[in-house]
Amino acid sequence: MKNEEEISSNGSANGAAQGMTVREAGKKGGDAVRKKYGPSFYEEIGRKGGERTKERHGAGFYGAIGQKGGNAVKDKYGTGFYEEIGHKGGQKVKRLIEEAKKAAS
């Protein structure tokens, strides 16, 4: 089922123009959960999921998946990408510090 397929009122994909897309249904459900439980709900389930993952795989798991992700980005964009985003981040920090100094004086 693709994200843009239509969903009938009973939740099944039917391709008809009368329903909503999977994306629209997901957003509607997410909005309802946020309204019912509040933003802290997502923090809590994220924390619980992180703790459970650490119990199952160990703390080193996060380093391993971070390294895999970093290598994938390096393979896709090259090493110069890190230099570019580092420079952009540094420039933003510099600008924020200057703005804070102006606001304080």
Image: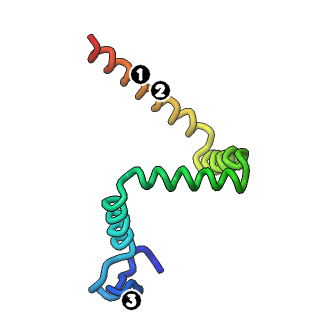
Q: Helix or strand or loop: what does disc 3 sit on? A: loop
Query: What is the number of the mark on residue 90?
Result: 2
Q: Name the residue under label 1.
A: 94
42 left or right of 67 in image:
left
Residue nearest the viewer, comparing 64 with 35: 35
- Vertical placement of 80 versus 60: above or below? above
Tell me, yes or no, whether the two marked residues, 3 and 1, touch with CB atoms within 8 Å: no
Please tell me which of labels 3 and 1 falls first in the chain: 3
Q: What residue type is labelled 3?
A: Asn
Residue farthest along the top direction in this orientation: 105
* Residue contact at pointers 3 and 2, CB within 8 angstroms: no
Which label sits on residue 81?
none
Q: Which of the 4 quarters of the picture holds residue 96?
A: top left
Give neighbour class at mark 1: few <14, some 14-19, many 20+ (Cα, 10 Å). few
Write the residue at 57% across / 37% down.
82
Residue 6, image x, y percentages: 36, 82
- Does the residue at mark 2 contact the one at mark 1 (Cβ under 8 Å)? yes
The residue at which mark 3 appears reads as 14
Q: For mark 2, give the secondary structure.
A: helix
Alpha carbon of mark 3 to alpha carbon of mark 1: how far? 53 Å
Residue 17 lies, in percent from the top left, at 29, 85
Under mark 1, the amino acid is: Lys
Mark 3 vs mark 2: in front: 3
The residue that appears at 56% across and 53% down in the rendered structure is 48
Q: Which amino acid does label 2 sit on?
A: Gly
